[in-house]
Image (cartoon, coloured by chain):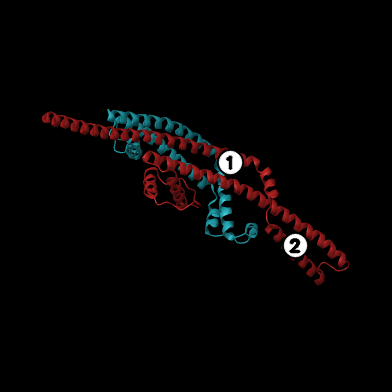
Chain colours: A cyan, B red
Amino acid sequence: MGKPNRLNLRNRRISAEIEEIAAAYCDGQQDLILYQHAIALSQCDHMIAELRVQSVRLIDSLSDLAPMAEARRGPFVGGDISVHSDSQQNCTTTTAIQLDWDAFQRALPYLDRLNRIEQHFWSRRERALKMFVAAQKRLARSEQA
Amino acid sequence: MTEIIPNNAEPVLNKLMKLFGYPPLLRNERLEDFKEVFQELYAALGPDDFLMDVHVYHFAIETWRMYRLMRYEAAILNKHESNQRAAWAEDGRKETIAQGMKEIREKFPRVSDAHPQYLSAVAELKTNANAEYRDNLNSASTDLDYIEAFEHSTARLERIETRISRAFKQRENILRQIALSRLVLSKKLRKMSDRIIEGAVLEAATASNAQLISQAGFDGQAK
């Protein structure tokens, strides 16, 4: 029996989330093998979701907070951009996107790394999905028999 | 935009958000917009079980990501075009002022720089140059402006294009997975319908047999 240390408790918390997703995948079917494959599938889904959130957080954290807040509050008053744009609404949107792009550009090296990990989990998910579908088929056959 | 078909997309999305967390949106993106995208895709793909719901959710996120990158492409081109235009307008203003100053000096050759007539002429020139500058900034953009911007931003656009193709590929993979799930489900349903049909045929055969037996018994008795 493992000691209930902090790591275990932390793992248990994540595992509860994964188990919840796996239970939803199984949809009430009581089969251990199917459940195991559902767990593998859920782990990949959970990791992909976490990695996506991380990449968005990264872009957000690298975006310049002050101009972003300014862009959201209202259009720029004065300056070249407000003179150039057709309407104030367009100006705000364009500025916000450009600020986003600047942050995205700064985050690119980190995003590439996150993307590589995400791709790894996507391939793992694809394999897990195939196994899950095969288990579902097997279960359906055994139910029929 | 197509009319949103009333479906159970909203409770499904709420369930998925509860399980997987909120969709990855930037601070300037709205959850309501994502919900609308999900609703439309949900209505179009018509998932049948939780597995397909998850696929539609992933599909919506990848679509969202792809359009975000496309927005960035447009932003890069707009920014470059705007910078080019500003530089061009500024050059024009400087040139107008330089030319105008020369003409003013020719018009008032012997007056000092502090002379009121000279100063008013310079002020008028600056006002005209500023108005010209504003006109140049606000004039409509042409395709040629964007072609030039495109040529200058090719390297950056290529970096985004790579990511767009990656998102596109991911979407295709998800669509393939949806097709696979649908195939499995259709086989499952076909088997179920086969069993129902077999049961019905068997029931009908039993009934007809019973009828034949009873008829034979009745004929025997009659004989």
Report the number of discs. 2
Nearer the observer, B172 or B87: B172
The quadrant the N terminus of chain A occupies is: top left
Residue name at image x 56 percent, y 59 percent: A89
Residue type for callout 1: Ile
The numbered mark at residue B135 is none
Q: Is residue A47 above or below residue B83?
A: above
Q: Position of residue A112 (x, y in %)?
A: 53, 37
Q: Quadrant of the C terminus of chain A?
A: top left
Q: Position of residue A102 (x, y in %)?
A: 58, 47
Outermost residue on the front side: it is B223
Could you tell me residue A103's position as x and y percent?
A: 56, 46
Residue found 48% across the figure and 34% down from its top: A119
Q: Secondary structure at mark 2?
A: helix
Q: CA distance from mark 1 to mark 2?
A: 39 Å
Label whose residue precedes the other's in the sequence (1 or 2)? 2
Q: Is residue A144 left or right of residue B21?
A: left
Q: Label 1 crowding class (10 Å Cα cut-off): few <14, some 14-19, many 20+?
A: some
- Give the left or right position of residue B91, taking residue A137 as reference: right
The quadrant holding residue B121 is bottom right
Numbered mark located on residue B160 in the image:
1
Residue A55 screen position, x and y as percent? 49, 42
Q: Is residue A88 left or right of residue B139?
A: left
Q: Nearer the viewer, residue A30 or A50?
A: A30
Residue lying farthest bottom?
B116
Query: Relative to the observer, which residue lies in front, B9 or A13?
Result: B9
Which residue carries the number 2 mark?
A: B129
Q: Label 2 is placed on what type of residue?
A: Ala
